[in-house]
């Protein structure tokens, strides 16, 4: 389960520091690397939104077709509350990712730095909560490996 991030070994202690291997200008490599992360973090936020949207879609589809006591479980107010909460959290994270993209497109590095970190943090936290809620709606089907990913 989950995404596996890239491993970042401690290369600086393991290799010679030839001038051709510098990242950016001498003394400015850390800043250049951090700018790269500012461009990378929003993609994690966007992946999280997509993952959560898929979980919501699966939850809605399952809740609509699953029957208990001759009624669809989607008619249960408790299930409706969970689905509505999932949708609100997804839309809030999506808006943050879009605002981050606007800052990046505008070249606003100061806002991009903050928004990129927020988009990654809020997006990944939201995806965890939404997928956990989806597992609750789907019951055992939400966790078994033999259930199709599209449910």
Image (cartoon, rainbow, N blue to C red):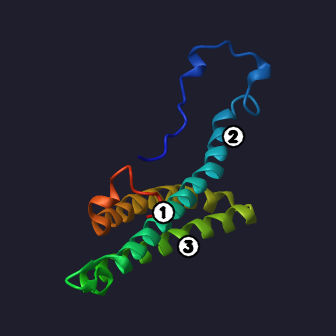
Where residue 135 appears, x then y in whole percent? 32, 62
Give left or right: position of 32 versus 118. right
| Above or below, comparing residue 67 to residue 55 in the picture | below
Q: Are marks 2 and 3 in contact (CB under 8 Å)?
A: no
Quarter of the image that includes the C terminus: bottom left
Where residue 26 appears, x then y in whole percent? 73, 28
Callout 2: helix, strand or loop? helix
The one of 29 and 133 positioned closer to us in this rendering: 133
| Residue 150, disc | 1
The residue located at (59%, 57%) in the rendering is 42
Q: Which residue is mark 3?
A: 95
Local packing at callout 2 (Cα closer than 10 Å; few below 14, some 14-19, many 20+) is some
Q: Residue lying furthest left in this view?
A: 69
Where residue 71 appears, x then y in whole percent? 26, 86
The one of 41 and 109 positioned closer to us in this rendering: 41
Q: Which residue is mark 2?
A: 32
The residue located at (53%, 31%) in the rendering is 7
Give left or right: position of 86 versus 116. left
The one of 55 and 65 positioned closer to us in this rendering: 65
Callout 1: helix, strand or loop? loop
In the rendered structure, which disc, 2 or 3, sits on the residue that comes first in sequence? 2
| Above or below, comparing residue 40 to residue 118 in the picture | above
In the rendered structure, which disc, 3 or 1, sits on the residue that comes first in sequence? 3
């Amino acid at each position: 389960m989950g995404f596996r991030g890239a491993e970042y070994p401690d290369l600086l202690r393991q290799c010679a520091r030839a001038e051709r291997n510098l990242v950016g200008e001498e003394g400015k490599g850390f800043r250049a690397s951090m700018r790269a992360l500012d461009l990378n973090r929003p993609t994690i936020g966007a992946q999280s939104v997509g993952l959560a949207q898929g979980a919501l879609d699966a939850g809605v589809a399952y809740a609509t077709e699953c029957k208990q006591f001759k009624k669809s479980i989607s008619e249960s107010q408790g299930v409706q509350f969970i689905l509505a909460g999932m949708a609100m959290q997804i839309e809030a994270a999506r808006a943050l990712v879009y605002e981050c993209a606007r800052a990046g497109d505008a070249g606003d590095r100061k806002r991009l730095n903050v928004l990129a970190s927020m988009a990654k943090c809020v997006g990944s936290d939201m995806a965890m909560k939404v997928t956990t809620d989806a597992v609750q709606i789907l019951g055992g089907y939400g966790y078994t490996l033999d259930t199709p990913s599209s449910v």
